[in-house]
Image (cartoon, rainbow, N blue to C red):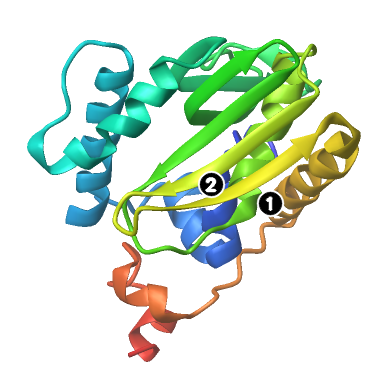
Amino acid sequence: MTSIQLTHSYSALKLFENCPKRYYHQRIARDAKDEGGEASKHGERVHKALEKKLLGEEELPTELQGVTAVCEVLTASKGELAPEKKLALNTSLNPSDWWDSDTWIRAQLDVLIVDGDKATVLDWKTGKRRPDSYQLELSATMVFIHQPEVNEVNAGFLWLQDKKMDPYRYTRSMYNRLLDTTLSKINRVEEALVHDVWPAKPSGLCNYCPCKSFCSYAKRWK
């Protein structure tokens, strides 16, 4: 099993953290597939609409008109605006293309603006306000590697339901700590692969797990 080359991302690392057994079935054995509920499909539609707005391709639908002002501020910003920016690293922690055979880590940033030695990273959120700062830590780490001129990343979650923002600031002096956090998370996943140990982590998430039809832990968690 150690011949498998894993590719990591925030969502994959979060999946492992929530339940290694589910991670195994979805990403290693691939005998379970998360089809996504209406909430996730709604999130995809919202992200696509916002991307098209920032690219100047389409106006926002009626239900997103409240975000128009934010989009206009972003498009008027100095610097280079890149919606849904895909950043990837290979096993040597050098920038790579998204689908390169040696790509090891991926991150897709909803909004990236690079202006000189400063960058802005924003993540649109359509669900309940439950910030996980690690997602933006990973994004900042990727920006520092891909954009060596950037010394400061101002990041934030934009909660569309609550009309709130959770801001974070990262500086290049924090880079080693940020990178160590990601490498530590990746190491736990790759150790599980080496030893083929994928313990279940029963929780309220079992009710929404694609493995619940055959997972004995999920059947007990009701």
Q: Residue at x 53, y 23 (%)?
A: 112
Q: Does residue 37 show up?
A: no
In depth, the one of 66 and 127 nearer the eye is 66
Q: Looking at this rendering, what residue extends furthest in the left direction?
A: 62
Which mark is on residue 198? none
Please state which amino acid type lies under the numbered disc 2.
Ala
* Above/below status of 133 relative to 201: above
Q: Are the two marked residues, 2 and 1, in contact with CB atoms closer than 8 angstroms? A: yes
- Quadrant for the C terminus, please: bottom left
Which mark is on residue 12? 2
Q: Please name which of the two marks, 2 or 1, marks the residue nearer to the observer.
A: 2
Percent position (x, y) of residue 75?
40, 16
Q: Secondary structure at mark 2?
A: helix
- Quadrant for the N terminus, please: top right
Q: Does residue 51 show up?
A: yes
Residue 114, image quadrant: top right
* Above/below status of 197 relative to 176: below
In depth, the one of 119 and 48 nearer the eye is 119
Look at mark 1 in the image and give the residue it sits on.
Answer: 189
Please state which amino acid type lies under the numbered disc 1.
Val
Q: CA distance from mark 2 to mark 1?
A: 10 Å
Q: Residue at x 56, y 31 (%)?
A: 121
Q: Alpha-carbon neighbours of circle 2 within 10 Å: few (<14), some, or many (≥20)? A: some
Percent position (x, y) of residue 140?
68, 33
Which of marks 1 and 2 precedes in the sequence?
A: 2
* Above/below status of 116 relative to 152: above
